[in-house]
Amino acid sequence: MMLRQAAKKALGLTSRQSTPWSVGISRSYHENVIDHYDNPRNVGSFDKNDPSIGTGLVGAPACGDVMKLQIKVDEKTGQIVDARFKTFGCGSAIASSSVATEWVKGKAMEEVLTIKNTEIAKHLSLPPVKLHCSMLAEDAIKAAVKDYKEKRLKTNGAAAAAGQTAQA
């Protein structure tokens, strides 16, 4: 993302103007992909050691795409209250990550596990050669939920063990 901003600055473009390469790819990619690529939502990261954060890190060695998706969960309700991503990869991978973070916010963890790569691909109108990007997004969601649940088990296990020690 920083490279794209630097390129826009060097070309004298404002943040609302498209870069020459995004104009060129508009013939190949659906407007939803271009929108999420040019204006990605929820970019960033949370502290992975925070017990309310689940982190999913997935990659596709064949194409070099790597996706980190993090969810922040309200521990009382089990609702995902926020999400962030960082992705190294093509425009379709970035767009898939961006869409995934939007779709998980406000939902229960069990509900987000029903999000399928086919839904992301359909929303972005991904061509068949880019379907692996939506698969990465689905896998990242599942990995983030799994990481959060494993953290909760460790935290609850440690709290139970501390409670037993205090009683003894």
Image (cartoon, helix red, strand yellow):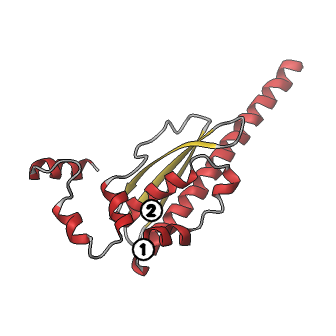
Q: Is residue 168 above or below residue 142?
A: above
Q: Is residue 155 above or below residue 116?
A: above
Q: From the viewer's perspective, is 9 left or right of 15?
A: left
Q: Quadrant of the C terminus?
A: top right
> What residue is drawn where x is 40% and y is 79%?
129
- Report which residue position mark 2 lands on: 96
Name the outermost residue toward the right: 168
Tags 1 and 2 touching, CB below 8 Å: yes
Image position, residue 3 (x, y; %): 22, 51
Image position, residue 4 (x, y; %): 23, 53
Q: Amino acid at mark 2?
A: Ser
Corner quadrant of residue 74 = top right
Q: From the viewer's perspective, is 29 left or right of 74?
A: left
Q: Is residue 102 above or below residue 119?
A: above
Viewer-side residue, 96 vs 29: 29
Q: Is residue 56 above or below residue 168?
A: below
Label 1 sits on a secondary structure element that is loop
Judge the density around disc 1: few (<14), some (14-19), many (≥20) Cα neighbours within 10 Å.
many
Judge the density around disc 2: few (<14), some (14-19), many (≥20) Cα neighbours within 10 Å.
many
Image position, residue 17 (x, y; %): 20, 54
Q: Earlier in the sequence, mark 1 or mark 2?
A: 2
> What residue is drawn where x is 70% and y is 40%?
152
- Report which residue position mark 1 lands on: 126
Rounded to the nearest angstrom, the CA distance separating label 1 from label 2 is 9 Å
Q: From the viewer's perspective, is 54 left or right of 92?
A: right
Q: Visible in this render: residue 90?
A: no
> What residue is drawn where x is 52% and y is 39%?
48
Label 2 sits on a secondary structure element that is helix
Image position, residue 121 (x, y; %): 48, 71
Q: Visible in this render: residue 97?
A: yes
